[in-house]
Amino acid sequence: MGDKRTLTTAVKRWDENTVAKTIGKYPERKKNFLTISGLPVNRLYTPLDSENLDYEQDLGFPGEYPFTRGVQPTGYRGRLWTMRQYSGFATAKESNKRFHFLLDQGQTGLSVAFDLPTQIGYDSDHPLALGEVGKVGVAIDSLADMEVLFDKIPLDKVSTSMTINADAAVLLAMYIAVAEKQGVSMDKLRGTIQNDILKEYVARGTYIFPPTPSMRLITDTFKFCSDKMPLWNTISISGYHIREAGSTAVQEVAFTIADGIAYVQAAIDAGLDVDAFASRLSFFFGSHSDFLEEICKFRAARRLWARIMRERFHAKQDSSCTMRFHTQTAGCTLTAQQPDNNIIRVTLQALQAVLGGTQSLHTNSRDEALSLPTEASVQIALRTQQIIGYESGVSDTVDPLAGSYYIESLTTEIENKAKEYIQKIDEMGGAPAAIEKGFIQKEIHEAAYSFQKSVDEKERVVVGVNKFQVEEEHKFDYLRVNPASERDQVKRLEDLRKTRDNEKVKTTLQNLRVGAQGDSNLVPLILEAVRVYATLGEICGVLRDVFGEYKAADL
Amino acid sequence: MSSSKKIRVLVAKPGLDGHDRGAKIVARALRDAGMEVIYTGLRQTPEMVVRAAMDEGVHCIGLSILSGAHNALFPKIMELLKAEGVDDVLVVGGGIIPEDDIPGLKEAGIGEIFGPGTPLDEIVEYIRNNVKI
């Protein structure tokens, strides 16, 4: 304690003498310094700020509980993170071409973007699909499209992440079926389905069914995969979209983990043993623009999840407590003004994610505030990761910023503040209840609105937007989705309906209906339907009949 | 415009796009500026948007799309409005909309397109100055 007293006195002396003298002459830029999430930032951090930190209890070692310093014992010294660019547009054929391009450029995993009709369980010829086919991702109506999408891509070698939620079980079934055709059995498949419905209700909007049947579909996939797909990540519990919708870093951690708690509880309630499925849960975060805060966020999230899994759910295996996560640089920080500046933003955000210990990473392209990215833009984005990985040296030692007085203090602060939120959500009855009350939506909206105000009032500088603007001529090479691809896709679908065995389709859909009305695991039934080329819209149509549709509450 | 009457605005999300951060923020900013705002929520067909605009008797419709479906859906909404004989409602749009698409959308009757980074005040001012009330 002698040390602490001396240091307290020393800090006071520094503040009153050295600092006061300087501030008298050169005032600081602002009265209060805040992180982008609004957490106060002190002038200086010293050992006093993390004096309660116990190295072994709170930090530990990489690959060991509580995983603050990372989930891999050797960090990136064994293998760099997976470079995984989210990609997909127009038809399966065009997207397959982009996948081959990315793999040829050294990308190490695939990440499939589906168009909105696919994500919401409509076929491309549904009236609500008008104008949306192939726009934000690739259009998939049936196994026939999946066969084209993964043509000449060896599914036993590549890992594939699919951003699909409400109808994740259907796309998973299609992936299994297409792998079967390649001669790859499902136990060898590596990849992820997002399968995170709770954040769809609050932030992303591609829900179909009400919460209860949606949670059933999710626990059905947990069960199915724990038996048959040991290498598959059954869910990617996502904070990314919560952050993109405007939340703070603390809220991102808190709401994501609250959703995670709900999924774990649902699976336990459905009769699964926590250690049978928890190691296949994965996470997904954004990497926003506050460099140090984001690094702390990743470390705090890992530690908090580990503690919850052990203390609340009594997970016995360490692997049940590891938070493995994907990161995407924050789309909402990209500016339409001076788009080349986005390359620099993405570089910093990617570096944060690496210093925070991400398992895989998507780097945004400079043109994404304007349109889908061109091939040239995607290449720069991928090269950004490669330069960080191969040239910068930051990946050669594990968790290099640990022990920084500020980093450790902020990591603890984010963990504690997120815990307070989670406690509040627990008191409301958990994430589903908090969503139903509109609590989470409201918190996110408040944060989003106050952030926009601070930009409009120039309290927050956004380079090129509210400071350092220039007159620009927008001469940008946009990626355009050819309107003909919507018509082509609809035509393909019509042909399929004529050529497949419609009797078999009818039978499998009827079996699915019966299963959905009862309590069978739905994944094998969906797989049967998919194999005989029942379409996504037909399968989801049956489930819509049985389960009904979710209607968002007015807020 | 007379200052005695409140401007009524329908903020709408046509199509399947779920990105509603912008729409909600704009709705709130318009409310803070003293307008009456009705927000449709997600997944509105052009028919639903036009129906809501007529039922609510709004002076302005604000459309938000980030999915790229604007070229199909914005003109469709303008057509339906015309077919219903509605010609005094100001329609504006926002979202991820390439610069090259803007002239075509304006030709279809959209008053203004507000891209990413637009200050809220600019939208408020534009509506105040251009709405027929």
Image (tube, helix red, strand yellow):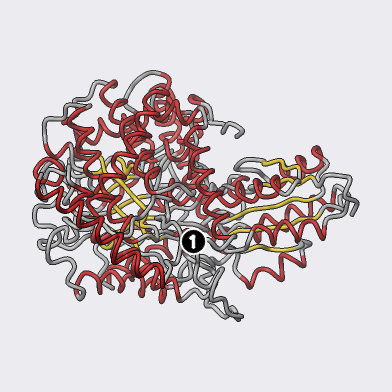
Residue A296 rendering spot, x and y as whole percentages: 28, 52
Residue shown at the point (51%, 30%) measured from the top left = A544
Q: Does residue A218 show up?
A: yes
Residue shown at the point (59%, 60%) measured from the top left = A456
Residue shown at the point (49%, 32%) measured from the top left = A439
Foreground of the two, B10 or A113? B10
Residue A401 rendering spot, x and y as whole percentages: 19, 60
Direction from residue A331 to residue B16 in the image, left or right = right
Looking at the image, is A167 positioned above or below residue A423? below
Foreground of the two, A373 or A487? A373
* Disc 1 residue crowd, few under 14, some 14–19, many 20+, Cα 10 Å: many
Looking at the image, is A488 positioned above or below residue A51? below
Residue labelled with disc 1:
A90
Q: Quadrant of the C terminus of chain A?
A: top right
Q: Quadrant of the N terminus of chain A?
A: top left
Foreground of the two, B123 or A177? B123
Foreground of the two, A467 or B86? A467
Chain on which label 1 sits: A
Query: At numbered mark 1, what does the secondary structure look like: helix, strand or loop?
Result: loop
